[in-house]
């Protein structure tokens, strides 16, 4: 790994940290209103995957070993921000409840020695968990058990079981990490411009027959590109045209991929053959 790649990894880590924290605060706030177990986790996995790929594209970063680090960090940042925001919201709502439901706030303040509704909440949290502030709120939520559903002020939770909850938390972290890492490794297999490192733009040319595909494969192995004589068909492998956005590919690259439509889950496309893009000899950058 050279210095450039280490720098890119560092910037990717910082960028994904910011994205994950912002997303975590947003889902944490939304979750105060409506939560269904697993919904925000899946949403975060998809959003973070897309963001990680976009960051790698922008940085022209080829994620290899660093993919796991970036994925783990994004997952950890999101989960932390999501949970902390939820606990923060819980504590703020408790203070609102005190304001709304206390019959004699002045008397409550006098008896407890608190000056604000939030201090009253903190006294309650401290009595219940031994910790106040967001930490106390986190502990109250942890002890209440995993949240399954929250809507229109109602909450449904599973019975609290610390071991099962710790497992659920680890599984969530692993799920997010695996998905983000998978997206990054998928990207790393995509062709990049040998001159500037940009990921090549891929345009669908169309489908070709199995016979034509075989002919292309042979021609490409001799470094020839007979695409001009092709006619698109309705079925068969798909042909992709690959060019650099900065114009470093006077002869575009070609990929022949087999699209697996009927596979459940990890569908996508399998590379059948590739002709790398031809580049200029003098780099303009
Ligand atoms: Zn280029």
Image (tube, rainbow, N blue to C red):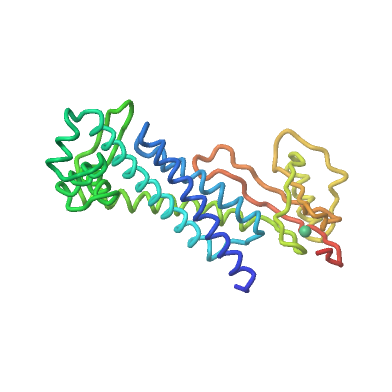
User: Camera-side residue: 75 or 279?
Assistant: 75
Which quarter of the rendering shows the C terminus?
bottom right
Residue 194, image quadrant:
bottom right
- Which residue lies most toward the bottom here? 2
Q: Tell me residue 149's x, y (percent).
A: 31, 32
Q: Is residue 162 left or right of residue 64?
A: left
Residue name at image x 69 percent, y 57 percent: 191
Q: How many numbered discs?
A: 0
Which quarter of the rendering shows the N terminus?
bottom right
Residue name at image x 27 percent, y 37 percent: 95
Q: Tell me residue 198's x, y (percent).
A: 71, 57
User: Camera-side residue: 150 or 255?
Assistant: 150
Ligand 1 visible in quadrant: bottom right
Residue name at image x 87 percent, y 44 percent: 229
User: Camera-side residue: 119 or 174?
Assistant: 119
Q: Is residue 222 left or right of residue 157?
A: right
Q: Is residue 61 above or below residue 132?
A: below
- Which residue lies most toward the top here? 152
Q: Tell me residue 283's x, y (percent).
A: 83, 66
Residue name at image x 41 percent, y 36 percent: 30
Residue 104, image quadrant:
top left
User: Camera-side residue: 85 or 206?
Assistant: 85
Residue 92, image quadrant:
top left
Q: Tell me residue 196's x, y (percent).
A: 75, 62
């Amino acid at each position: 790994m050279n210095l450039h790649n280490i720098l890119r990894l560092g910037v990717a880590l910082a960028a994904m940290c910011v994205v994950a924290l912002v997303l975590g605060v947003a889902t944490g706030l939304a979750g105060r209103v409506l939560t269904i177990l697993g919904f925000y986790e899946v949403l975060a996995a998809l959003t973070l995957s897309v963001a990680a790929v976009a960051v790698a594209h922008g940085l022209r970063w080829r994620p290899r070993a660093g993919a796991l680090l970036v994925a783990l960090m994004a997952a950890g940042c999101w989960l932390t921000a999501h949970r902390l925001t939820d606990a923060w919201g819980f504590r703020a709502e408790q203070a609102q409840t005190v304001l709304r439901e206390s019959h004699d706030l002045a008397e409550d303040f006098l008896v407890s020695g608190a000056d604000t509704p939030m201090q009253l909440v903190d006294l309650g949290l401290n009595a219940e968990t031994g910790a106040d502030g967001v930490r106390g709120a986190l502990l109250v939520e942890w002890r209440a058990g995993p949240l399954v559903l929250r809507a229109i002020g109602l909450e449904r939770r599973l019975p609290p079981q610390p071991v099962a909850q710790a497992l659920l938390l680890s599984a969530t972290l692993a799920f997010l990490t695996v998905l983000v890492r998978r997206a990054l490794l998928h990207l790393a297999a995509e062709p990049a411009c040998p001159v500037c490192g940009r990921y090549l733009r891929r345009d669908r040319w169309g489908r070709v027959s199995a016979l034509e595909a075989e002919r292309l494969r042979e021609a490409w192995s001799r470094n020839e590109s007979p695409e001009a004589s092709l006619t698109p068909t309705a079925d068969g492998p798909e042909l992709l045209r690959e060019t650099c956005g900065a114009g470093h590919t006077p002869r575009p690259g070609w990929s022949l991929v087999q699209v697996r439509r009927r596979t459940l889950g990890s569908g996508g496309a399998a590379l059948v053959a590739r002709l790398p893009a031809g580049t200029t000899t003098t780099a303009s950058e």
